[in-house]
Image (spheres, rainbow, N blue to C red):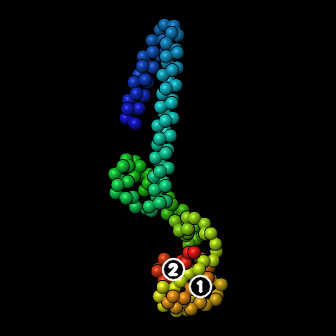
Amino acid sequence: MKQVFEEMKALYEENQIDVNASITSEMQYHAAVQLRHAVLLRNQRCILAYLYNRLQMIRDIRWGFGAILPPEVRACLSESEVNWFSSYNRNIASYMSSIGGVGVDLFTNLQPPKSLYIQVRCLSEYGDFETSDGNTVVLTKNSTHFLQRKDCEKLIHQGILEHITD
């Protein structure tokens, strides 16, 4: 980027010289000024596309790794990019806490479930478990159950249940 900025500065200065010279004489510099101006606009578009792509990658890193940047990624970012990342984190947190009065965690279930019910195996003795529809299920070690995904997700994360995939 530094080279592009230096090139743009040189082109701009050449244009200024030619514009000042063309004021006193005829339009012989007009084509050169237009060409350099077109190059300046192209370089500007390239820089903006590059910066936009970097911000999109930083945004994707946020959704992939969470709120804390890995040190190897942070080392590759400029100070303004790290500030943008922090601001993006604050905006996401503010938005999530404002949804529905109690807030919603947007980072769970980034992919929609393939089915509403899943087959699970109990890994430890848990006892009675009440589902969202009011039914009670007895979770004993090595028992298998066909439950709604939303009912058993927390138990899966706690290591009490295991999702059985065929």
Q: Is residue 130 left or right of residue 90?
A: right
- The C terminus, quarter of image: bottom right
The residue lying at 64 percent from left, 72 percent from top is 115
The residue lying at 62 percent from left, 69 percent from top is 114
The alpha-carbon separation of the residues under discs 1 and 2 comes to: 10 Å
* Kind of element beneath mark 1: strand
Q: Position of residue 157 (x, y in %)?
A: 48, 77
* Kind of element beneath mark 2: strand
Give the label on residue 145, or none.
1
Q: Which residue is mark 2?
A: 162
Q: Position of residue 100 (x, y in %)?
A: 60, 69
Q: Position of residue 9 (x, y in %)?
A: 40, 27
- The N terminus, quarter of image: top left
Kindly identify the amino acid type of the residue bearing the numbered disc 2. Glu
Would you place residue 37 above or below residue 114 in this image?
above
Residue 79 appears in the picture as rendered: no
Kindly identify the amino acid type of the residue bearing the numbered disc 1. His
* Residue closest to the eye, 137 or 102: 137
All told, the count of numbered labels is 2
In the displayed image of the protein, which residue is found farthest to the top? 25
Q: Residues within 10 Å of mark 1 (few under 14, many from 20)?
A: some
Would you place residue 137 above or below residue 116 in this image?
below
Residue 7 appears in the picture as rendered: yes
Give the mark, 1 or 2, whose residue is nearer the N terminus: 1
* Residue closest to the eye, 134 or 147: 147
The residue lying at 58 percent from left, 67 percent from top is 99
